[in-house]
Amino acid sequence: MSPVLSGILQLTAVVAALALVHRPLGDYMARVYSSDKHLRAEKWIYRLIGADPGAGMRWPAYLRGILAFSAVSLLFLYLLQRLQGVLPHSLSLGFTAIGPDQAFNTAASFVANTNWQSYSGEQAMGHAVQTLGLAVQNFVSAAVGMAVAVALVRGFARSRTGELGNFWADLVRGTVRILIPLSVVGALVLVACGAIQNFAGIHEIGQLTGGTQQVNGGAVASQEVIKELGTNGGGYFNANSAHPFENPDAFTNLFEIFLILVIPFSLTRTFGRLVGNVRQGYAILVTMGLIWLGFTALMMWTEYAGHGAALQAAGGAMEGKEQRFGVGASAIFATTTTLTSTGAVDSFHSSFTGLGGGITLLGMMLGEIAPGGVGSGLYGMLVMAIIAVFIAGLMVGRTPEYLGKKIGTREIKFAACYILITPTLVLGFTALSMALASPPGSILNTAGNSVHDSGAHGFSEVLYAFTSGANNNGSAFAGLNANTPWYNTTIGLAMLLGRFLPMVFVLALAGSLAEQKPVPETAGTLRTEKPLFAGLLVGAILIITGLTYFPALALGPMAEGLS
Amino acid sequence: MNNSVRSTARLLGAGLRALLVLTVVCGVIYPLVVTGIAQAAFHDQANGSEITSGGRSVGSGLLGQSYTLEEKDKDGNPLPDPKFFQPRPSAAGPNTENTQYKLLVSGASNLAADSKVLLSSVEQRRTDVAAFNGVSPSAVPVDALTASASGLDPHISPDYARLQAKRVAKANGLPAATVEKLVEDHVDGRLLGFMGEERVNVLKLNVALKELRAQH
């Protein structure tokens, strides 16, 4: 079998698995978020929190809950890293405290569902930080994203009320009923295939030619599964999902791709159920699926072609890729991780072909909505849908509506603010980093002898860092030495602002929609469940992103890929 | 004012309690349950899939290792041992930060597709691998010329293993056909016929080679 055919079959297998699972899982999630019943364990949790899960919240209250929870999480994770040095050896593995700027960056990163890492896991973080700190945020930051998406969907589904549900109930249910059960099953699948799961710490294992290797043990599989399922992406080890202990074989590789995609795609079904029309969910699903498939096909094409002087000299694009995965599966993983907010990698994007690297960048620049992060993908796509019906409304001269709600001035203002936030952060911080004196010194792939002669790929390293941070992805052109006070601080800010500012506008939008009374459907209503609308939506997404980022992309990956 | 301070404090308190409860659920109970089941049901895998030979552990079947001589080349790198099959090049970095251990570190080169540094190391590796194995430079496959993603890749391509067979046979004083057969026995096909790539696990091959040598 040719490698290309094997790549296509692997892609087909992932699509088939998703097609099989998205309906039951999407329906289940719809029941989770709309059920009146509380599990006994959940009742205990609500009592400990001191929250009434039945109390409806208007959007400012919902937002305050998110911000309070995230602020406390940020501080807790920061302190846990700062105090690592005084923890007992069994918890710290002898690692010292993380410095203030890196601890801020890492805390911001995991609370914002980004999981950008300026540290190497096996060289910096002990059991306590990994399992009590980072892994916990893998769960709860994902649950927060899903809660916001559900709140927006309720905004469409409800009328003449300002109430969007209860944040604490949504947070706890997402964690307890969705993420944990799936994670237990997924973790055991990974362990069965070879991912490690122990608390052995750093220990010696033998070598064939004598001597020993020192290996870092840990609760890897349990963290790996939620890293993918919650579209987090922070690796236990520096090599992330390329490390054989995180991703032991070609099956686990496809399984991890499936885990990344399963909740974001299934949430379109949940959306359809909650708004009472599953065909609306299908239109969103098709839009996401088309972009994901298109990007993956392009990525496979460019990676199998293997352009670039060094890759051509080697005879293929295998630099930074593992033999057990090969080019095809690595290409699927790369587009999957950058079209969601995951950022886990099974191969290193910096060594991809110039155009391949550009595709990973563009995937993030779309706002990670195809299918996007858990929850954030759905709310990002629904904001784009509002923009698309607005554009369509302008064309025919009618007040736009979506799902029976009028898209008026207020709604469009919120949507416009939402889509302006990340480009502002990405382009602003990238420009600053290139203009200032010392930040360019972090670039690995320079064109000349001077650090200021960055070359196309060097510029891409910086552009990638802020694109990844502000869009909450977390993958990197990892040649950039990001563990400097400048990058730790600015990327940390980009991650926090890129996560929580858009949420403000999404919730404000949800509140505004929930207050409206539904408008009856007429002959002139744009049918948003039809293929025409999916096409319009794909077009709007590509045009808006293209216009925003074209100059930056031309300077980086396009210059590299076309030279 | 006083009211809003009080309500903010109350909200942060709720946030803190929620975090602590969920930390116990997701950070203590969940990993311990998974570890318990994993250790009971999949003991070997959960502890790193170690391989034993001659009564001692010789490493993890999932991690690459080096097979080198005491002697070093002019750059101070240990020379490859001709008696063993050699793994892919590794770009995993040195220990640089926050560690008092000599740890196994994972990582990639992150060099760009058009990088001059990468180009020259690819060319250098082609020359070295060809000379070491006594083959033509054009016969060296791509996985022998490029560093893996993890720097710990346990596999090489079947082509790279076949290319090394003659040299390994000669260095061990074994018939070439025997070693070539050993390589073919260790070629793993794609999982279920289509997942991933064909590959040879270097450690398993070398363990088998060592046992074969002991028999002869």
Image: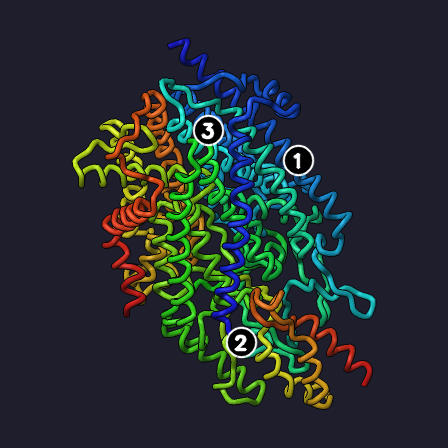
Chain for mark 3?
A: A
Q: Report whether B41 appears left or right of A111.
A: right
Q: Which residue is mark 3?
A: A71
Residue at 40% in and 73% down: A310
Question: Residue beneath label 1, please?
Answer: B28
Give how far apart the Cα atoms at labels 3 and 2 are. Answer: 48 Å
The amino acid pointed to by label 2 is Ala
Q: Are marks 3 and 2 on the same chain?
A: no
Q: A475 above or below A402?
A: below
Residue A386's tag is none
Sequence order check, earlier mark of 1 and 2: 1
Q: Are marks 3 and 2 in contact (CB under 8 Å)?
A: no
Residue B39: x, y in percent? 75, 48
Residue annotated with mark 2: B144
Q: CA distance from mark 3 to mark 1?
A: 22 Å
Q: Where does the C terminus of chain A fall, quadrant-wise?
A: bottom left
Question: Which is nearer the eye, A463 or A523?
Answer: A523
Nearest the eye: A43 or A82: A43
Q: Is residue A273 above or below residue A165?
A: below
Judging from the image, mark 1 belongs to the subunit labelled B
Identify the residue at image location x=61%, y=52%: B100
Using the rendered view, name the quadrant where residue A138 is placed: top right
x then y, percent, for residue A220? 63, 48
Residue flagged by tag 3: what amino acid is it?
Answer: Ala
Indicate whether A256 appears above or below A276.
Answer: below
Q: Residues within 10 Å of mark 1 (few under 14, many from 20)?
A: some
